[in-house]
Image (cartoon, rainbow, N blue to C red):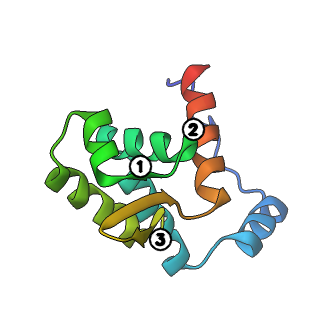
């Protein structure tokens, strides 16, 4: 018998009701999954870490990661589509930063957990 399974079948209606009342809707859960998919790539994670420390341009990010500007731009498009980063133009330069403090907290919590 597996030790990680219930030995008897029994439900806990009060607990189920509490959880059900707080369960996000399907669209919100899909969005959450998309965010975690975007974070699940080492290059994008490195980009987000760098941007959690400093606003950087595409050339800076390419230098940090050892990738081409084109490859970085592709990754940044995915991160922007998931509202994880934003950019601003300054003359002919595009500077990127984290979209908001939630992204920084998510990244910091994930790193903390990974280091344990």
Provide the residue designation for mark 1: 39
Instruction: Judge from the rendering whether residue 109 lies leftward or rightward of residue 63; answer left or right.
Output: right
Q: Are marks 2 and 3 in contact (CB under 8 Å)?
A: no
How far apart in space, not on screen, are marks 2 and 1 (Cα)? Answer: 10 Å
State the residue at coordinates (64%, 39%). Answer: 109
The residue most toward the right is: 14
State the residue at coordinates (41%, 49%). Answer: 39
How far apart in space, not on screen, are marks 2 and 3 (Cα)? Answer: 18 Å
Provide the residue designation for mark 3: 31
* Secondary structure beneath label 1: helix
Q: How many neighbours does mark 3 have within 10 angstroms: few (below 14), some (14-19), or many (20 or more)?
A: few
On the image, the x and y values in percent for residue 56 come to 43, 50
Of 1 and 31, nearer the camera is 31
Q: How many neighbours does mark 2 have within 10 angstroms: few (below 14), some (14-19), or many (20 or more)?
A: few
Disc number lying in front (3 or 1): 1
Task: Please identify the quarter of the rendering in which residue 63 is found.
Answer: top left
The residue most toward the front is: 91
State the residue at coordinates (49%, 80%). Answer: 27
On the image, the x and y values in percent for residue 85 come to 46, 62
Provide the residue designation for mark 2: 110
The answer to which of marks 2 and 1 sits earlier in the sequence is 1
Task: Please identify the quarter of the rendering in which residue 75 is found.
Answer: bottom left
């Amino acid at each position: 018998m597996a030790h990680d399974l219930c030995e008897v079948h029994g439900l806990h209606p009060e607990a189920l009701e509490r959880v059900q009342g707080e369960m996000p809707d399907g669209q919100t859960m899909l969005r959450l999954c998309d965010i975690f998919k975007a974070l699940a790539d080492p290059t994008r994670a490195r980009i987000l870490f760098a941007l959690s420390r400093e606003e950087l341009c595409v050339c800076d990010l390419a230098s940090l990661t050892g990738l081409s500007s084109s490859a970085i731009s592709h990754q940044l498009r995915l991160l922007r589509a998931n509202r994880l980063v934003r950019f601003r133009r300054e003359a002919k330069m595009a500077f990127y930063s984290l979209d908001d403090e939630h992204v920084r907290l998510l990244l910091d919590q994930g790193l903390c957990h990974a280091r344990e």
